[in-house]
Image (cartoon, grey):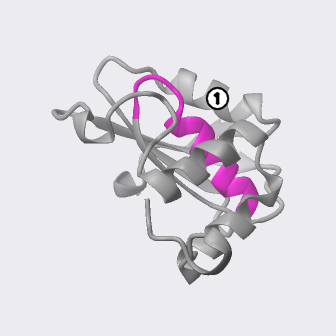
Amino acid sequence: MRGAGPGGVAPVAPREAATIKAMKHTAPAALVATLLTIVAGCDGTGRDPAARVDGPTWRTGFRVEGMHCGGCAEAIVAELNETPGVRSATCSFETKRCDVELLPTARADAAAAAIRKLGYTVTPDGPADSK
């Protein structure tokens, strides 16, 4: 953990402060996971982030309706990163698109279900690099 500043509070870099501010629409569990990542490099799952599975992956994409702001996109990424089989995810409020990198045994419908669980409408849209 970083050294404490005045009053025993660790300083927050501007990028991290922006991430925290964007999380205002995020479910509490996702917010805690994000804060743990920022503060301690922990992903909140109990797994060692350095021990991520390497190897082949595949990509898929979704059109996501119902996002109102960048915080919505951050909530989707946080949820997907907690979904088994998801290697990484990006989501854009501006384009209403979410791209997901999956392990070979993972199914796209599990990623779509994770997004739907948050209340968004999801339509399969294929990987970004196939467009």
- The residue shown at (67%, 70%) is 94
For label 1, the crowd category at 10 Å Cα-Cα, with few meaning under 14, some 14 to 19 and many 20 or more, is some
Q: Identify the residue at horizontal 53%, vertical 32% (top origin).
A: 82
> Does the magenta run of residues contain 82?
yes
Q: Is residue 81 left or right of residue 75?
A: left
The residue at the point 60 percent across, 53 percent down is 35
Q: Nearer the viewer, residue 2 or 16?
A: 2
Question: Magenta stretch?
Answer: 70-86
8 to the left or right of 48: right
Total numbered labels placed on residues in the image: 1
Above or below, comparing residue 47 to residue 7 in the picture: above
What x and y, as percent, mark residue 98? 56, 50
Quarter where residue 86 is shown: top left
Furthest residue toward left: 55
Drawn side of residue 35 relative to residue 2, left or right: right
Q: Main secondary structure of the magenta part?
A: helix
The location of residue 88, given as percent across then percent down, is 41, 44
Furthest-front residue in view? 7
Question: Measuring 82% from the left and 54% from the top, which residue is drawn there?
Answer: 25
Residue 72, placed above or below residue 85: below
Give the labeled residue for mark 1: 114
Q: Position of residue 106 (x, y in %)?
A: 39, 21
Amino acid type of the residue tagged 1 in the rendering: Ala
**Quadrant into which the N terminus falls:** bottom left
Residue 64 versus residue 8 in the image, above or below: above
